[in-house]
């Protein structure tokens, strides 16, 4: 059986690497042409440009790898079916489940690799991408004003009514400060916080001490001006806002969920729970997609296996991601429980695929 496993696995891996390389190349080409005017104006050094695109590799891989694997599996099994090799293998008494075992094993390897990249590499690589973009490609670095801006830093949680990157100002800010056990012990209200001379300065600051139940104790402290213990620069806050949910690790998301539970921010909490579980399912989309398509892949017998694999792969992947986006939207709007929003589509494809595999004779 090892010969058969190696044969199926070799065809799948070769196809996967080829398609993955094509997708990454296309991604680079599209990004270069979309940013061509900024690159020509900034004229960054070749080494900086190479570093910029090298740092983008983890994100590109996570986005295109499931599609590349889906198409390669369809093609590998399509070729086996076209040459009647699947029929011959099963005529020897080998079940369909045994045939696809090396493919499932490869899916698991890629899923855990994606999980590692998402948790350990992605945030730092994307921060480097944004730093290079601001310093060498898009030097203005200013984004549009943000309403209801929320973020955390060390043991503090910040809620701002508005954040203006251009003026480096946070308006209408509420700050919650935690102790070492994660309990909210201080609450500060600032009319505004402005970044000036390398530090954040709050104006009209009122600080309250809180007990274990969240009730105010003692008299509030008042300051006309007060330095705020925040070391993030405005451009880093821009990245934090745009990238936290997309690139944050599961550990950081779990910590944010605990913090939001402590301050009873239920609207933000439900969205964060969905994002947490989506980050659990995304790396394993390799497995969900492949299990879902395997019953169909084992039945493809067209002569043009390459073209049919490409078409079916795109259609099937499109259906998966559309259904996943739809259920996530239902979760965020409260139609279904947040946890179901992230898991319904993956579990549906997993159930359909396993049912189909057991029904194959």
Image (cartoon, grey):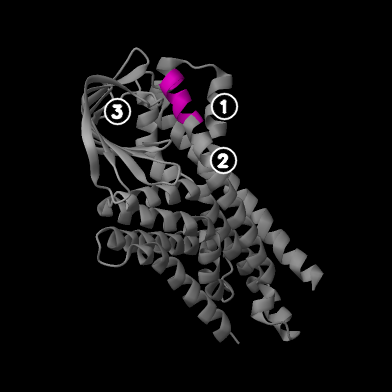
- What residue is drawn where x is 29% and y is 49%? 263
Farthest residue toward the top? 197
Q: Is residue 129 magenta?
A: yes
What secondary structure is found at the residue carrying circle 2?
helix
Q: In the rendered image of this protein, does residue 65 appear above or below residue 131?
A: below
| Distance between the alpha carbons at the discs numbered 1 and 2 | 15 Å
| Distance between the alpha carbons at the discs numbered 3 and 2 | 25 Å
Could you say where residue 52 lies in the image, as x and y percent from the top left? 52, 28
Q: Which residue is mark 1?
A: 51
Could you say which disc has been placed on residue 121 in the image? 2
Q: Is residue 185 magenta?
A: no
Other-residue count near label 2 (Cα within 10 Å), few / some / many at <14 / 14–19 / ≥20: some
Q: Quadrant of residue 99?
A: bottom right
Is any part of residue 84 visible from this angle?
Answer: no
Q: Which residue is mark 3?
A: 143
Q: Quadrant of the N terminus?
A: bottom right
Other-residue count near label 3 (Cα within 10 Å), few / some / many at <14 / 14–19 / ≥20: few
Q: Nearer the viewer, residue 203 or 2?
A: 203
């Amino acid at each position: 059986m090892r010969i058969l496993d190696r044969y199926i696995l070799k065809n799948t891996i070769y196809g996967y690497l080829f398609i993955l390389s094509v997708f990454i190349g296309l991604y680079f080409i599209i990004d270069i042409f979309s940013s061509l005017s900024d690159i020509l104006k900034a004229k960054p050094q070749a080494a900086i440009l190479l570093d910029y695109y090298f740092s983008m590799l983890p994100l590109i891989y996570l986005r295109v790898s499931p599609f590349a694997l889906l198409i390669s599996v369809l093609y590998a099994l399509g070729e086996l079916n076209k040459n009647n090799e699947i029929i011959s293998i099963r005529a020897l008494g080998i079940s369909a489940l045994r045939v696809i075992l090396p493919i499932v094993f490869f899916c698991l390897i890629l899923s855990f690799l994606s999980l590692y990249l998402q948790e350990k590499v992605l945030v730092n690589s994307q921060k480097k991408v944004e730093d290079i973009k601001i310093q060498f490609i898009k030097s203005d670095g200013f984004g549009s004003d943000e309403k209801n801006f929320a973020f955390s830093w060390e043991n503090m949680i910040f809620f701002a009514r508005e954040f203006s990157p251009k003026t480096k100002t946070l308006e209408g800010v509420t700050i919650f400060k935690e102790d070492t056990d994660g309990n909210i012990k201080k609450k500060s209200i600032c009319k505004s916080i402005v970044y000036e001379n390398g530090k954040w300065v709050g104006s009209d600051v009122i600080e309250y001490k809180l007990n274990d139940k969240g009730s105010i104790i003692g008299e509030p402290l008042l300051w006309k001006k007060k330095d705020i213990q925040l070391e993030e620069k405005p451009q880093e806050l821009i990245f934090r806002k745009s990238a936290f949910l997309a690139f944050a690790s599961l550990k950081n998301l779990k910590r944010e969920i605990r913090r939001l539970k402590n301050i009873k921010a239920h609207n933000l909490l439900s969205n964060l729970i969905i994002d947490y579980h989506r980050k659990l399912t995304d790396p394993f989309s390799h497995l969900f997609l492949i299990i879902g398509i395997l019953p169909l892949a084992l039945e493809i017998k067209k002569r043009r296996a390459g073209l049919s694999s490409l078409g079916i792969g795109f259609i099937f992947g499109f259906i998966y991601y559309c259904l996943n986006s739809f259920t996530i939207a239902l979760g965020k709007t409260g139609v279904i429980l947040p946890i179901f929003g992230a898991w319904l589509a993956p579990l549906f494809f997993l159930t359909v695929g396993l049912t189909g595999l057991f029904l194959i004779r």
